[in-house]
Image (cartoon, rainbow, N blue to C red):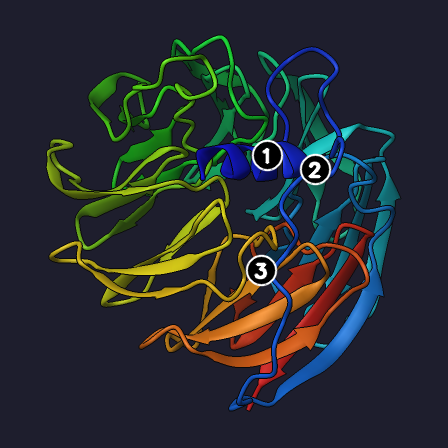
Amino acid sequence: MKKNLFAAVLATTCLFVSGCNSYGTDNAPTPTALTQIDTKLNVQQLWSASSGAGVGKQYLKLPAAYENNRIFAADYKGVISAFNAETGKSAWRTVTKLPITAGPAAYAGLVIVGTSDAKVAAFNQDTGVKVWEADAPSEILATPATFKDTLIIKTIDGQITALDVATGELQWHYQEDLPSLILRGSSSVTFNNDALIAGFSNGKISAIDIDSGSLLWQTPIASPEGSNIIDNMVDIDATPIVKDGVVYAASYQGNVASLDMNNGQTNWQRAISTFSGIAANNDRVFVSEADGSILAFNQKAGAADWKQDALLYRNISGPAIYNDNTLVVGDKEGYLHFLSTDDGSLVARIKASRKSVLATPLVVNNTLYVTTTNGYVIAYRTS
């Protein structure tokens, strides 16, 4: 199983080695064929708009961002687009010529992106005009994250840089030691009070003081246990979640874990492997596994409430919670799958694109926004 799982990973992502930035040879197991489902949701497309060239042949996740009734999207060639969130009407489009590999993020009137050549740039949300540009330590794959007046940039080599969000000026820098071989993916960070939570490719979750960059606590949720370098890969490529004083995180070839936000102490952990993403509602934590399974874990006890394996080897995206009772994932063939959060049953399916949906869908104001690898932003609602 591990051999097939790693083949699936190699076909959809890359190891962090020189020149490895594309999908590569598709030698993954054959995606599970889709079967007829009992449709219980009516999914309606509100609008669809082109935001440029998408991600090309690169393995990038460029999700949409939202602020002030606008949706922002970017492509790998450096085009940033803004749309009216309700109608999809274009507000502006800026050709930056930057090799964008991360973002966009939308915050405080700015649209922020990261690049493959270690740059961070911020643009005015109303006009698309560049406000500032700053250097980063290395290539950026994680979506920039913002908290109050601070912008956090996490680079592929395990460094975290804090910048002033208004000016791009350096505030502090944090370095984490990583193994020599990692997946070419990168989780972003999340925040709780005055701490940021970050997962790294060494299988560790860290809490870092947002003001000083000092380490508050660190907990491994996965440990290398294999006999070779590939079996020892334990990357955390799913952005952690903080909910009600608890951190939820998951790794590749490791665990999904519940940690105490105050001290990092482990409440529970269960074996799992993911490089896509996790989500949570009021009762459960949902994980898109590397093989395409979707699991729901009870937040308090860590028990697996249900497992859906109808999407094996379909290279599903991270899960998004829609209206609390529905889970949404995209797949490599451009389908969107809607699942009940109660029992994991498939309640709807639509064909969104002829290309893949890699980025986790965005949910804002009962609207689902999806970005496709060929550069479209599509808005949906259900009834």
Could you classify mark 3 by the number of other residues whose Cα lies within 10 Å: few (under 14), some (14-19), or many (20 or more)? Answer: many
Q: How far separated are the C-alphas under marks 2 and 3?
A: 26 Å
Q: Nearer the viewer, residue 1 or 322?
A: 1
- Identify which amino acid the numbered label 3 is placed on: Pro
For marks 3 and 1 on the same chain, the one whose residue lies earlier in the sequence: 1
Residue 331 x %, y %: 63, 58
* Residue position marked by numbered label 3 in the rendering: 361
Q: Quadrant of residue 184?
A: top right
Q: Is residue 280 left or right of residue 377?
A: left
| Disc 3/disc 1 C-alpha distance (Å) | 25 Å
Residue at image position (59%, 34%) is: 7
Q: Amino acid at mark 1?
A: Ala
Foreground residue among 5 and 285: 5
Q: Nearer the viewer, residue 154 or 135?
A: 154
What's the mark number on residue 27?
Answer: 2
Mark 2: amino acid: Asn
Location of the N terminus (image quadrant): top left
Inspect this view and state whether residue 198 appears.
yes
Q: CA distance from mark 1 to mark 2?
A: 6 Å
Residue corresponding to mark 1: 7
Left or right of residue 199, residue 162 in this image: right
Q: Are marks 1 and 2 in contact (CB under 8 Å)?
A: yes
How many neighbours does mark 1 have within 10 angstroms: few (below 14), some (14-19), or many (20 or more)? Answer: some
Label 2 secondary element:
loop
Q: Earlier in the sequence, mark 1 or mark 2?
A: 1
Q: From this view, report whether residue 234 is shown above or below residue 138.
A: below
